Amino acid sequence: MTEFAALIMEPGNLIAIGVAVLVFFTCMTIGKSLITGQELDKRMKAVAHRRDELRRQSRLSINKDSGLRQRDEGLYKQIVERLNLKTLLEDPKVVDSLAMAGFRGPRPVSTFYFFRFVMPFVLAAAAALYVLVINPGALQPNIKLLVVVGALVAGYYAPNIYIQNLASKRRDSIVAAFPDALDLLLISVEAGMSVESALQKVSQEIGSSSIELAEELSLLVAELSYLPERRMAYEGLSRRTNHPGIKSVCTAMIQAEKFGTPLGSALRVMAKENREMRMSAAEKKAAALPAQLTVPMIVFFLPVLFLVILGPVALKIMDMKK
């Protein structure tokens, strides 16, 4: 162990390790930029597929309500229907939660119910295998039972936690780029473009900053074209994003189209409010930073500071004793 530590602490090896770390992060940065472009193309293809689906459904259901749903005939759907999991594990907010996480249509709903039913048994079986077979003598019997029950409960809530984390990350990405997208939309509308053309142009320009926002704006354009009421498209965007700033913008656009008020003035006010909202969020994070740095300073900075201050004194005392 000491030989390995001495080998690591050699200056040449330290320099080589540092260079390797820098090269690794450089490759990761370049690869991430390439993957981002591919992911944007993939999302745009998915939105185009959704647009075609909306067009096909609107043609097939002229005299019906707009049930814009994709077909779901997979294995998960069959299991969910046979076990009646939608009634057994009923969650009225599952569709909105999946939409906020970027999953649309009936297929993700069936997948969610399937994993919500399976995951408790999978995690409980894994915990039982560990405490009873792999390491049977490490815990007391009551603790083993508690571990298995805890794994069972964690498996039940794991799909919800996963969806909530995805929705939170998606919302953060959308909110971070939304003020810039709103400024671009204001410029496009004041230049004389229609709302659909302006939204499509903004979705193309904002894709480099937020793929999720570009996807939502493209989907909004598709829904504006094929839903029976334009109000439904704006309400769908506000429901999928679940952010106060975006909800206020959607409400303003609905009212502008309903009462015929100028859309440019409403967008200018909304853009200002969203910029102020983003600035206040940044100020809030900056104000919370000192409190968050207290523990890292105590754990990492103060011991080093004490060592630098008291180290020479300790060495002098040791020399005096000799």
Image (cartoon, helix red, strand yellow):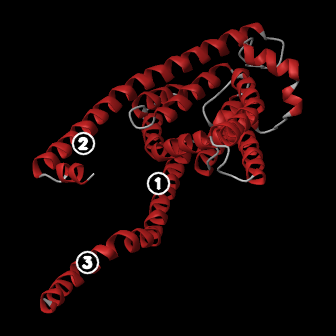
User: Residue at horizontal 47%, vertical 63%?
Assistant: 285
| Above or below, 282 relative to 163 | below
The residue that label 3 is drawn on is 307
The disc at residue 52 is none
Quarter assignment of residue 94? top right
Q: Nearer the viewer, mark 1 or mark 2?
A: 2
- Report the number of numbered marks: 3
Identify residue for label 2. 21
Could you say whether the residue bearing mark 1 is in a helix, strand or loop?
A: helix
- Give the mark nearer the N terminus: 2 vs 3: 2
Q: Would residue 312 be visible to someone looking at this image?
A: yes
Q: Amino acid at mark 1?
A: Arg
> Label 2 vs label 3: CA separation?
28 Å
Reading the chain from its start, which is encountered first: label 1 or label 2?
Answer: 2
First in sequence: mark 1 vs mark 3: 1
Task: Tell me which amino acid carries mark 2.
Answer: Val
> In 3D space, how far apart are the residues under numbered discs 1 and 3 (Cα atoms)?
46 Å
- Residue at 40% x, 70% y: name it: 299
Residue 104 placed where, x, y %?
A: 66, 26
- The residue labelled by disc 1 is 275
Q: Residue at x 49, y 62 (%)?
A: 280
Q: Could you tell me residue 160's position as x and y percent?
A: 70, 40
Say which amino acid is labelled 3.
Leu
Which element carries disc 2, helix, strand or loop?
helix
- Image coordinates of residue 17 in percent, x first then y, are 20, 44
Mark 2 and 3 residues: CB-CB less than 8 Å, in contact? Answer: no
